[in-house]
Image (cartoon, grey):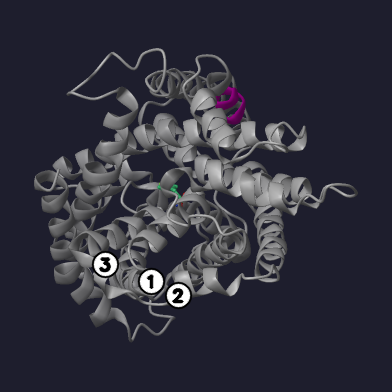
Amino acid sequence: MTEHKGFTSNFGAIMAAVGSAVGLGNIWRFPYICGQYGGGAFLVVYLCFVFLIGMALMMTEFVIGRRSQHSPVKAFSTLRPDKPGWRFVGLFGIITCFLILSLYLVISGWTLNYVGDTATGALANMDGTMLDQHFSHFSSSAIRPVICLAIFTIMTAAVILGGVQKGIEKVSKILMPILVLLLVVMCVRSLTLPGSMGGVEYLFKPDFSKLGAAGVLAALGQALFSLSVGMGVMVVYGSYIPKDDNLMRTSLWITVCDTLIALMSGLAIFPAVFSCGLEPAGGPGLVFKVLPMVFNSMNPVTGFPTGTVFAVIFFVLLVTAALTSAISLFEAITAWATESLHIRRTPATLVIALCVIAIAAFCSLSLGPLNHIHIAGMPLFDLVDRLTAAYLPPICALLTVLFFGWVMPGADIHDELSNHGTLKTGYYPVLRFLTRYIAPIALLLVLITGIFGN
Ligand code: PFF
């Protein structure tokens, strides 16, 4: 048996898991979905889902991982050896990670490209129409996005090759504080611009007329995605958490940090957008098309290029956030390959990197040169997006929570949460109720709407 190597400290574990949770979902996706579904109204529902369902799912995955000391495929069958069929849930999670990672790498590659574009001043003199065309031209071209995603994958794989302690934990401990610092700088800049309060109002003032059933479901989907639950990544990280850690406290820290960073991202973006009198509901293109315009407007005619500096800071922030999330998805696949396929870490990492670059490249090309090739009636990028947004994570999360609530022995759960009876677990009945009834029903609703609503 190989020695199990995990995180060395509670702080390291929290930083790595916060690194996984904080990503493009917080900085790129949360602000525009929040704005789209009525600002404060969306926020209230989102916060309820994050703290009730998302956090319960995170604890579920941590308990399964730390109790079994395995990655998802083996974890389920270790905890219930008499029910080996549950290992397919783990396998399902790995497939989901693979697909999400492919798409994630495409968008991460875009962020990397925009660091270059902003740093060289290539966008500095463009107006809204030119920025729009620039983004469309770049994202649908054949070579550049593929090179960017390949570079990003190599950066991710390099950290994975370093191992759990010297790679993931060390990099997360360095990058996460840097990320918070950059975000604070962006928030201060954005909030001190003239007319910025309109953006704060847009983000926080509740408009329940815009929420609707679609907004409620989007809030749950975003809560799961943002906390990185529902695909087994937190099972893998759970298996690395030190045995004397308080899982409840660790989960709470991660959830609070993730939520605060999402809110700060909103505060870094919308006040600046409003201050320039631009359209806030920019959708997914908000960050790539609207924000560069905001930065350009900060550049004075002569003198120091303030806007360019903030633009570079912003895209470095995005790259940093995306990197630590991509690392966690990559690690989940690597842990499965080393544990279940018995491949050593280095060759496993290299093979996974090549496979994931190939799929991501096809996704990227499907936005341009291969746009005419349709699978299930749509280009590959859209298909993977649909699968990873609406179907696979809720299915995987539902099966995981059913295993935890109904199949895994309650005594094992309690023992793991209380660190063998040494910690108080007054919250346990609430967690049990949430994971047996509330979370499964909510996930089922998301799934049904995802399937029949499209
Ligand atoms: N939580 C990440 C984000 O908000 O960008 C995305 C993510 C990472 C989802 C890891 C799932 C995952 F397993």
Kind of residue indicated by mark 1: Leu
Which element carries disc 2, helix, strand or loop? helix
Local SS, label 3: loop
Q: Which residue is under mark 2?
A: 204
Amino acid type indicated by mark 3: Leu
Residue stretch rendered in magenta on the structure? 148-152
Who comes first in sequence, dot 3 or dot 2?
A: 2
Whether residue 263 sits left or right of residue 118 in the image: it is left
| Near-viewer residue (399 or 385) | 385
Q: Is residue 222 left or right of residue 27?
A: left
| Residue 170 visible from this viewpoint | no
**Mark 1 and mark 2: Cα distance apart in space:** 7 Å
Q: Is residue 296 magenta?
A: no
Residue 149 in the magenta stretch? The answer is yes
Q: For ligand 1, tell me if the residue under mark 1 lies within 8 Å.
A: no
Q: Residue at x 37, y 38 (%)?
A: 97
**Rendered residue at 68%/35% (across/down):** 123
Q: Position of residue 380 (x, y in %)?
A: 31, 24
x and y, in percent, of residue 86 in the image: 18, 45
x, y percentage for residue 269? 57, 59
What residue did someone put label 1 on? 43
